[in-house]
């Protein structure tokens, strides 16, 4: 009995060794690999190469958005599933577009072409746009097709939700639930300021020094001018006129007037100095990453909760959008349950 078991064990070891050797001898053809099917939606295939392109774009997006250099295993797994879910959803939606015979009008196509032209100009012109496409390994035709598909999907969803409205009860309930968050305006301050800026703030061609010592030298260079303007302010000269004459900020054209701000919207030193002022008072020099500021407090705007009547139209928009999203989510789930969706996780 012992000899039989030993013989079986030796046979298994040999088989495992042969399997290991075979696995190492077999080379995966990249062209075959990228044509592997990672999912099917009602028989329509999603190929691995399409999936990998989407995956790489999503990874780069997240790294850029959150300033992450490397993604951990949990994040990668989550991204993989999100990408495949998104691709499945898009194909299902496009199948519904075809089923309902949704077409784009001449005006739709014209709008898309105008939008593409806008993107080209925003990218720096035709040549730079082509370079960006080459870097991403996509063609202009693919971009245009993506825009058209997205517009068709929008039309599908608009048609699905076109009859949705908001009742007064729904609107009032929404207001009561959210008035302390969505409809509460924090205390705000309205100021004028004069900025004597560091060179790299006003001139893109100037480089910000890397060392603190070199930065401090630049602060020292602009401080005499800032002190000279401060003397004029303290002497009672018109603040708005001084801002027009001396400030390096774009607000100079409005006499240094800035839009009202709440805590956390401006650099901390600016906010802290503003909060120390009474209406009509001016600050001493305030040093920030931008240079030296002189601040005048124009007015304070107390914390306030807007009334239902003030925000009625905004509330209606919120409620309708919420109901639309709920209907779209529910309908998508229903469509997915009825669809023949297969995932081949071993291939991705």
Image (cartoon, rainbow, N blue to C red):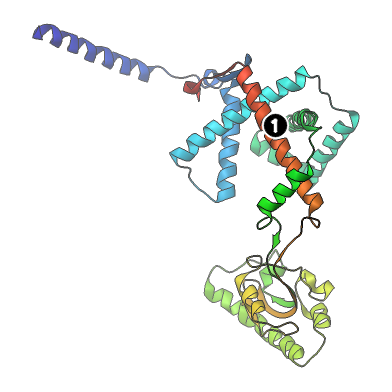
Q: Nearer the viewer, residue 3 or 183?
A: 183
Residue 348: x and y, percent? Answer: 50, 25
Q: At 82% from the left edge and 78% from the top edge, which residue is drawn?
A: 244
The picture places residue 345, in percent across and down from the top left corner, at 49, 23
Q: Residues within 10 Å of mark 1 (few under 14, many from 20)?
A: some
Q: Quadrant of the N terminus?
A: top left
Extreme residue toward the bottom, this view: 235
On screen, 24 above or below 166?
Answer: above
Element under label 1?
A: helix
Q: Nearer the viewer, residue 101 or 189?
A: 189
- Place of residue 74 in the rendered image (x, y in percent of width and height, measured from the top left): 45, 38
Q: Which residue is mark 1?
A: 328
Residue 298 screen position, x and y as percent: 77, 78
* 173 over 41 or under it: above or below: below
| Left-right relation of 119 to 10 | right
Q: For this rendering, which residue is in front, 139 or 185?
A: 185
Is residue 318 in view from this perspective? no
Report the number of numbered marks.
1
């Amino acid at each position: 009995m012992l000899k039989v078991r030993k013989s079986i064990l030796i046979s298994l070891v040999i088989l495992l060794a042969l399997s290991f050797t075979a696995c190492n001898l077999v080379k995966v053809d990249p062209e075959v690999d990228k044509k592997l099917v990672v999912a099917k939606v009602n028989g329509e295939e999603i190929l691995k190469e399409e999936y990998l392109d989407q995956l790489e774009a999503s990874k780069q997006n997240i790294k850029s958005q959150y300033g992450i250099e490397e993604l951990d295993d949990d994040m990668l797994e989550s991204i993989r599933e999100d990408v495949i879910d998104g691709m499945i959803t898009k194909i299902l939606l496009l199948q519904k577009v075809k089923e309902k015979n949704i077409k784009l009008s001449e005006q739709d196509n014209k709008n898309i072409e105008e939008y593409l032209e806008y993107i080209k100009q925003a990218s720096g012109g035709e040549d730079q746009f082509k370079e960006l496409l080459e870097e991403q390994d996509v063609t202009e035709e693919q971009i245009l097709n993506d825009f058209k598909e997205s517009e068709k999907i929008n039309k599908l969803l608009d048609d699905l939700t076109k009859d949705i409205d908001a009742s007064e009860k729904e609107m009032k309930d929404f207001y009561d639930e959210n008035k302390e968050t969505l409809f509460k305006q924090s205390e705000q301050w309205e100021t004028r300021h004069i900025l004597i800026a560091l060179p790299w703030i006003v001139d893109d061609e100037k480089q910000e020094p890397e060392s603190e010592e070199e930065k401090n030298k630049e602060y020292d260079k602009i401080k005499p001018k800032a002190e000279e303007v401060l003397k004029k302010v303290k002497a009672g000269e018109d603040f708005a006129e001084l801002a027009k004459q001396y400030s390096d900020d774009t607000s100079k054209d409005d006499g240094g007037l800035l839009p009202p701000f709440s805590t956390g919207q401006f650099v901390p030193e600016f906010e802290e100095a503003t909060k120390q002022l009474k209406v009509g008072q001016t600050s001493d020099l305030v040093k920030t990453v931008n240079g030296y500021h002189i601040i005048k407090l124009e007015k304070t705007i107390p914390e306030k909760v807007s009334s239902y009547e003030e925000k009625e139209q905004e509330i209606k928009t919120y409620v309708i959008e919420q109901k639309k999203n709920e209907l779209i989510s529910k309908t998508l789930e229903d469509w997915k349950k009825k669809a023949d969706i297969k995932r081949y996780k071993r291939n991705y």
